[in-house]
Amino acid sequence: MTQETKKLIEILSKYATCDMSDGLVKYKHKYGGTLPNLNRYSKNTTGKTMVGKAYTILFAPKDDPREAIGGGYIDKLPEDSVLVIATTLNLQKKDAPFTKMSNALYGGLMSTRAQYLKSRGTVVFGRVRDIDEHLELQRDVFSYGIGSAAHGPVVKMVGINVPVEILIDGYPEPFIETINPGDIIMGDDNGVVKVPDNEELGSILEYIPKRVQADTLVKEDILKGEECNPAQKKRRTNATELEIKKSYRKLAIKYHPDKNPGDDQAAETFKKISEAYQVLSDKEQRVKYDQFGIQEGGKQDMVDPEKFFDDIFGGESFIPYVGELTLLKNLTTEMELEHTQEAEREASKLETEEAERYYEANKLDIPASRLLGDHSLVNLSAEEQQKIVDAERKKLYDAEKERVEAEQQARRTEIQDELTKKLINRLSLYTETDKSKDVIESVKEKFKLEAENLKMESFGLELLHTIGEIYYNKANTYLKSQDTFLGIGGWYGSLKEKGGIIKDTYSTISIALDAQSTMQKLAQMNERIEKEASKENKDDDNTETATENENKTTDKIKLETTTEETKEETKEETKDGKEKTTEKEKEEPLPTAEEVAEMEKLLMGKILAAAWRGSHMEISSNLREVVSNVLHDETVSLSKRKERAEALKIIGTVFKNVERSKWEAEEAKIYEELVAEATQKKNKKK
């Protein structure tokens, strides 16, 4: 079991099953993960909730066509797991006693061995026996009831660590709850709860402490005589970051100026929504707002551009799949390095010029290089001196650049290593089971549910398709390299992948150049407008000067002379103006404010398109490396690597076929639309 899982178990064990159910209900799990009708048949004096990952055992009637599994299961029980024992649906009942079996599925010897192996507890969807032994061990044991007879005469074991189905009598109709190997199981005096081990869990864990704290305060208020409902409304006001983000995106799409051209009210509402999000999305600003109000909480620095792009391209939800995006951070670091070098070059030039001026002014018999403190350059010419200084500076710059690039590569390797571990853990839902049809369907269903949430993130659909394509294609190539003669099938897939990389690189460069071209066009438009405004100001000044001269009662000759000089100057200015104005500018009308605004919007879209293509290349590169790490991991057997490839194909197929419904497509993200419009306009020009 990984350190990450141990840490998760330790955190969850501090909370009651009721706390977890509250969190699950908050996130639209209407039954709160409850596995009903189970009773505790043991003693727990630790004060901690039973928490562990499910290790499942499936029993079926003796006449079941499946072959019985011999050899037992208890000795294979993993540390920190929760043993989950169930029967096939035909042995279950939707009402009490919830099982058709009177025989017990679990006994004291099993508990003794499980306790020695450091398993966290046992949940039996049936009967147990040897109650005194469970109590003596102080092991958490939950079941539907008690029985005295062993199970051997009536059932056989047909599955180890496979999905098990539990019949539950819900409203308006009964339903089946599936427990998959690896699902998190919690249990205490309030009952047993199944917790989904997916990206949603992070948000639930963020919510639970706030809810517990709020309920504690509600209890204190009630003890002071306050009514229950007002106390709950007052205290239960904490929204999670995910909820805040989702609400912001929904409102931002509705009131964005691009969606409501000419609507000043919508623009003002959008501004207020953005200001509110700036405060609520930052924990420190939220604290200030709670204490001092909008005056203090609304004081915002500029939005961090790195965080801005992270949020646009998938946000935090995709980090477990694609990792941290470092493109903008690396570009910023390299630009800072370039600017530092340029600043040092300018400073050195200014120092040299200042020394030269001092040398000339004071007629000293020593060269300027000595005034700068560098005696080694005394006998060299100024040009030679500058070359040596530039070479030394370049050497320092190259060393610093090499150091920065090494740090960036180390961080990239670190990200890929983290993603590799997470991907192996994800694939274990398939690789560590019997790979039956039920398992495959269970894995598919799990990742379909994840995809349903992920696809609604900004650029979520594109990211899912990218992940899916890479998972599927890399896995398919690997399997063909193992199964075809001389690995020819794999060679062809590898060649196809390299062709795709070249195409992506060309596309990225092309879009970046297109953005640069649009930026230049916008600059030219603004330059023409500024030039025209400057010309109008100059004409106004000349008109005022002429009026003043006409009102003067000075010498007529002087007036005529002044008039002639003014005419000559005006002619010269007009002549110069004609030379600076191109024929094309004469023919084209001056850009309107609306045209400039449209060009700014187009530029924004193209910049985002360039950033997206660059980020897409980074994501794709990381994903390919991670999948290669998983498939070429020589610490595991070839058969295990093949199983990983099979699991990748399953998940890849799910992700690359995900689509948004018509209704979901109407909620298309603002930035996706900007990129789409910019790309379409470019294609039309072709």
Image (cartoon, grey):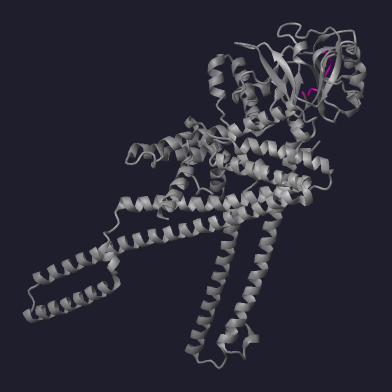
Up the image or down, 479 lies above or below 343; here it is above
Q: Is residue 45 magenta?
A: yes
Residue extending farthest bottom: 365
Q: Outermost residue, front direction?
A: 485
Location of residue 584 in the rendering, given as x and y in whole percent from the top left corner: 29, 66
Where residue 99 sits, quadrant-wise, is top right
Residue drawn where x is 74% and y is 41% of the image: 645
Residue 547 highlighted magenta (yes or no): no
The image shows residue 357 at horizontal and vertical percentages of 48, 85
Residue 232 picture quarter: top right
Does residue 144 show up?
yes
In percent of width and height, residue 200 lies at: 64, 32
Q: How many numbered circles does the render carry?
A: 0
Q: Give the residue at x 70% y 50%.
A: 625
Relative to 253, residue 380 above or below: below
Residue 16 seen anywhere in this rendered image of the structure: no
Nearer the observer, 37 or 465: 465
Given residues 581 and 51, the one toward you in this image is 581
Which of the image's four quarters has the N terminus? top right
Q: Which residues are magenta?
A: 41-49
Q: Is residue 129 left or right of residue 594?
A: right
> Picture coordinates of residue 462 (x, y %)?
56, 42
Q: What residue is rendered at 55% in x and 76% in y?
A: 348
User: In this rendering, would 439 be left or right of 371?
Assistant: right
The quarter in which the C terminus is drawn is: bottom left
Q: Is the stretch drawn in magenta largely helix, strand or loop?
A: loop
